[in-house]
Image: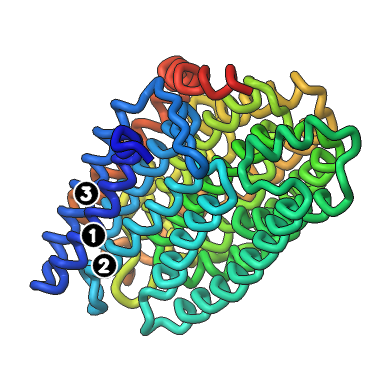
Amino acid sequence: MRLNDLLYLLPLLVLVAAAILTMLAVAVKRNHRVIFGITILAHLVALAVLLDLRGIQASLPPLLMVDGWGVFNMGLILWTSLGVTMMSYAYFEQREERKEEYYILLLLATLGACVLVISQHFMALFLGLEVLSVSLYALISYLRTREKSDEAGIKYLILAAMSSAFLLFGMALMYAVTGTMSFPEIGAYLRSTQEIPLLFLTGFGLTVVGIGFKLGVAPFHMWAPDVYEGAPAPVSAFIATVSKGGMVGLMVRFVTETGGYRNTSMLLIFTIIAAASMLAGNLLALRQKNIKRLLAYSSIAHLGYLLVAFLAGNQLGVEAVSFYLVAYFITTLGTFGVVALLSDNERDADQLEDYRGLFWLRPGTAAVFTAMLLSLAGIPLTAGFLGKFYLLASGVNTQQWVLVIMLVLNSVVGLYYYIRVIAVMFAQPEQAPEARKVLHPAISFASGATMAALALLLLWIGVYPTTLVQLIRGLLVTFMASR
C-alpha cells in the first residue's frame, strides 16, 4: 500500500482513532458528556473527510475499492450513526449502567459497516462483517439488567455465528473453484467459462444464506423481532439501518462485480426471497401489539421491496436501491427515535398502549411519529412514497411483473398496521391527561433536534427529491460506467 492510499482510508482511520481516544478517555475518567462529544466530533470529521473523496475511483488492491458507490454508502452510514448517537445521550443518561463503553462499540460497529461497503475481496468482507457483528453482540445486550436484553444478545450471537459459518463455507467453495477471493477476478473467471460449475453454485447459495441472515429477510428472519424487542431502542435503530444497509451495499457490489445478474439461478433465488419477505413481514406484523416487533417485521417487508430494485441490475435499479435506502434510513431512524424518546429508565416505550392518546399529551412527538409511519406506508408527500415509486419504476423497467404486483398488494396490507398505530395515538386517552401515568421520556436538546431534522428531511425529500436524485447519479456514474 502506498502512502497516498491512506488518504482514501481517512474516514476509517478517523473512526479507529476516535475509538482508541474514547477508550483512553474512559480509562482516565468516566464522563458521559465528554465521551458523547468525542463520538459526535468523530462522525463530523469523518464526514468532512469523506467530502474530498467524491468522484474518486481508487482501488486499494486486493481488498478495497473506494468509488462512488462506496462513498455514498459510507456517507449514509456515518450520517445515520450520527443520528443514533444523538438520540442515545438522553436514553442512556437516565440509566444507571455504565454508559461510556456504548460509544466505543458504536464507533467500531460503524467502522465495520463502512469496511463492508468498500470491500472487493472476501477477506475484507469477513473482517468488516466480524467487526460489525462482534460490536453488535455487546450493543444488543448492553442493558444487562434486563432479562430480554441478555436473551436478545444470545440469540443474535448464535444466529450470527451460524450465518458466518454459512458465509465462510460458501466463500471457501467459490475459492476452490476460481482460485481467487477477489470479486473482479471471480467475475472474470465466470465470464471465461461456458458453464458455471455446480460447486461454485453451491458456494454461492451458501453465501446467499449467510447474507440473508444478516439482512433479516425471509426465511432467515426468525431472529429479528426478538432482537429488536430486547435491544435498547437506539441499538434497534442501528441494526435496522446501518447493519442492514452495510450488507445491502456489499451485496450490490458483490453481485455486480462477479456478474451474478447473468446467472438465472441467482435471480430466481432472490425473487423467491423478495416475495417471501414481503408476505411474511406484512402478514406477521398485522397482529403485533409491540411497536419494536412491529417495526422488525416491517423491516423484513421493506427489504423485500428493496430486492425488487436490486434484481433489476441496471443503472435505474442501483439508483432506486440508493434512493430507497435513504428514505428507509430516515423513516426507520425516526420511528425508533420516537421509541427512544418516550422510554424511561425501567423499560422502553414499546407497547401499543404506551402511545394511546399521545397526540393529546405530546402533539409534537405524535406528529413526527405519524409522519414516519406514513412514509413507511408509502403515502404521497413523504420520502417513502417516492422511494416505492422508484422501486416500482425499476421493476416495471425490467418486467418483473410478479414482484411489482406483490409490492403493490403488500403495501396495501402494510397500510393497515401503520394506520392502526396512528389511530391509537389520536384516540382519546382513557384518563384525563393530567391524571394519566405516563413514562418519563428521555428528552434532550440533541434527541429533540434530531427528530425535528429527520421529519423536515422526510418531507423535503418527499416534495423536492431532485437534489438527492442528482447527488446519487453524480456519485454512481463512475460505479456504473465501470461495469
Q: Quadrant of the C terminus?
A: top right
How many other residues sit within 10 Å of disc 2, few (<14), some (14-19) or many (≥20)?
A: many
Nearest to N terminus: mark 2 or mark 3: 3
Marks 2/3: CA distance?
15 Å
Marks 1/3: CA distance?
11 Å
Q: Are marks 2 and 1 in contact (CB under 8 Å)?
A: yes
How many other residues sit within 10 Å of disc 3, few (<14), some (14-19) or many (≥20)?
A: some
- Find disc 1 in the rendering and name its residue: 89
The residue at the far left in this view is 29
Marks 2/1: CA distance?
6 Å
Residue 363 seen in render = no
For mark 3, give the secondary structure: helix
Nearest to N terminus: mark 1 or mark 3: 3
Q: Quadrant of residue 77?
A: top left
- Tally the numbered discs: 3
* Closest to the observer, 276 or 213: 213
Residue 62: image location, x then y, percent: 52, 42
For mark 1, give the secondary structure: helix
Residue 230: image location, x then y, percent: 48, 72
Residue 394: image location, x then y, percent: 69, 24
Q: Residue at image x 74%, y 44%? A: 274
Q: Amino acid at mark 3?
A: Ile
Q: Are marks 1 and 3 in contact (CB under 8 Å)?
A: no
How many other residues sit within 10 Å of disc 1, few (<14), some (14-19) or many (≥20)?
A: many
- Find disc 2 in the rendering and name its residue: 92
- Find disc 3 in the rendering and name its residue: 40
Residue 94 seen in render = yes
Residue 388: image location, x then y, percent: 62, 30
